[in-house]
Image (cartoon, rainbow, N blue to C red):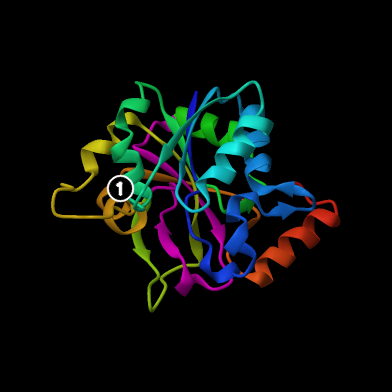
Amino acid sequence: MKAVLLIAGLGTRLRPLTDTVPKCLLPINGKPLLGIWFDKLVAAGVSDVLVNTHWLADQVTDYIDKHAPAELKISISYEQQLLGSAGTLAANRDFFDSEPFFIIYGDNLSDVDLADLYASHLEHRPVLTLSTFEAEFPERCGIAEIDHQQIIQGFVEKPKKPQSNRAAAGIYVAEPNIFDYFPEQQSISVLDLGFDVIPRLIGKMRNYSIGKLIDIGTFENYRKANGELEEGASP
């Protein structure tokens, strides 16, 4: 089983913390966020992981060399210029095989059960299983419209007038044929899943609801994440 862990972001809203430490290595109750995701991937049975790096890439590589679980074979894709979430996938297409794979935004903290998510995907085999959570501020998120069969019938990134409060969690399981829905990249410098790919999959995606998700992108959320773990919440 394979996974892509997207961790190359600049973390600009967390400066000055991220001036010297990449966001994925900020500690959550003493453990780097990247380490939390590694543990969750191991627990789900993932064996091969692709991570993309950019900002303070040497620190990320050093952490992986010293602390990555032995169960994971990790490939590092350094991006001199950020490619966007879908751009990273397109640039590393040779990493994937014929099996479904995880796509995870590594700057989120979640209580998602990855093994259960994968099993749900295998039961139905849509092009993409999209995890959603109940967003407090849906206008800041990618919002899904979900029918009674859990098929996603609409998706808008950061809508001015949200049609629901079910937001994409940045945790997906994709079929290999997802690449058939990527736009031609020659005229696009950066490809984003939310803007450029997911809207092309309307009717071909299923929803998977999760409980907690915290985007570790602001000081408020970073403090909240640490507080929740201190109270005993599962990552």
Magenta-colored stretch includes residue 130: yes
Q: Is residue 215 visible?
A: no
Secondary element type, mark 1: loop
Q: Is residue 19 left or right of residue 78?
A: right
The x and y percentages for residue 34 are: 62, 44
Q: Residue at the far right: name it.
A: 231
Q: Is residue 137 left or right of residue 25?
A: left
Vertical relation: 176 (above or below) 184:
above
The x and y percentages for residue 78 are: 41, 41
Q: Amino acid at mark 1?
A: Gly
Magenta-colored stretch includes residue 134: yes
Q: Is residue 219 visible?
A: yes
Q: Which residues are magenta?
A: 124-151
**Residue sitting at x 14%, y 48%:** 186
| Residue holding disc 1 | 203
**Residue sitting at x 55%, y 70%:** 13
